[in-house]
Image (spheres, grey):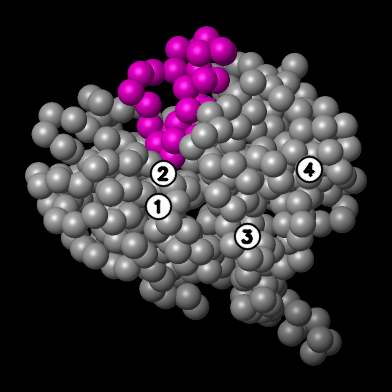
Amino acid sequence: MRLIISLSALLIMYFAYGFYISQTEINVIPIKLKRNESNIFYDYKGIINVHSESSLGSGSYSQIVTAAQSAGLDFIILTDLNLFQIPYQFEGYQGTTLALAGGKYSYLDSRLIYYSKDKKILGDNLGEAQTRLSDLLSQKSENRKDDLVTLAHPFKSGYSWSGEIPSGLDGLEIINLKSSAQRAWDISKTSVIWSLFTYPFNPQLSFIRLFQEPTEEISLFDQTSETKKISLFAGAEASARAVPWDNFLIRFPSYQKSFELFSNHILLRSELTGQYQNDRQKVFSALKEGHFYLGFDLLGDPKGFSAILEKGHQTFLMGSKVKYEKGLVLKAEIPTAPSDFYEIVVYRNGMRYATTNSSVLNLQINEPGTYRLQVRVSLQLPLPDGKKWLTWIYTNPFYIE
């Protein structure tokens, strides 16, 4: 009898706490904010590092793109693992979402994401693909205009990178959702289990409370960007197959949930028009040149954010190389001031350089260096968590030489 009473009390407490946290919405800016779109740039968001049932995932191509449409994505790049015949025939617009096809390949102890503007394949087997990747990595990335090679999850256990970053690498993932989950598990298994229990009541909170800043990845990126041009990426690592029974019972977390967490926001000077070939070129060029920022979309839609470098009447997007001279101004603006305490932080060569608590930044640049920005917010999470600082926006660097 006592056991039944105790279990009943625990269930009542569980559902009472669940009701408490279900009332919590974490949005750093209003959901229905009327955004003043930039007169210069257009903001489109997309996802990379996605697996289908052809490799590690549980969904078909059409199911994945349907989830991308539901998540409001403008583009998605499918990257099945060690799939040597990339399904370029699947590329094109499906609804309002531009579906693109790339690949993810085992290389040394790590994994690389590859996308070709010219729809090349790396080979018919893993040996040929690795040989071709080795050749691409030995070239300077700026000399390869038609290929994009990105290092996935550089510190994921079992798949981490060792040694120097090769000159041919275009980018590295500082955000990888599976790496983030693994890091949370290593830090506190109890906290992860607690999040799983509270997930049915508030999925948004369950992820936010576990997320840790990618300090190792950021440090590696900053060290590398001091000597070569490189871009930071967010990888969904989406497979909808986090538990062994996904194919039979549930797909957890769903593709849509994975797509709603973090995304890559490209900034374009002209709109996407719905014409596959032209828009494919625009998306590729923006990713290749680093003209994008990473948004923690689960905290709030960052669309409307801008960061530019002004030189007289010229404007340069993040990812640009600019010769230093007097009069350079770094400008940034967020859609509106977050409801929680926040700061825009400018980093120069990996070190904190300037900070403002305003929604608008105007910073005179007085010396060369590699400059990037983070917009950080201090969130009040429900008990037992309390205050937590998280980065809402990461920009790619401005390279001032």
Q: Mark 3 falls on what kind of element?
A: loop
| Residue 192 within the segment the image draws in magenta | no
Residue 293: give its label: 2
Q: CA distance from mark 1 to mark 3?
A: 18 Å
Query: Could you tell me which residue is drawn at 76 percent across and 66 percent down?
Result: 158
Which residue ends up furthest to the bottom in the rendered image? 2
**Nearest-to-viewer mark from 2 and 3:** 3
Residue 69 at least partly seen:
no
Q: Residues within 10 Å of mark 4 (few under 14, many from 20)?
A: few
Residue designated by label 4: 131
Give the position of the N terminus as an image quadrant. Answer: bottom right
Residue stretch rendered in magenta on the structure? 266-292
Query: Could you tell me which residue is drawn at 73 percent across and 77 percent down?
Result: 8
Residue designated by label 3: 154
Q: Mark 4 falls on what kind of element?
A: helix
Q: Earlier in the sequence, mark 2 or mark 1?
A: 2
Question: In the visual, does 234 lie left or right of 248?
Answer: left
Residue situated in front as seen by the camera: 289 or 293 = 289
CB contact under 8 Å: marks 2 and 1: yes
**Nearest-to-viewer mark from 1 and 4:** 4
Q: Mark 2 falls on what kind of element?
A: strand
Residue designated by label 1: 394
Above or below for 236 versus 276 = below
Say which quarter of the image contains residue 10: bottom right
Q: CA distance from mark 2 to mark 1?
A: 6 Å
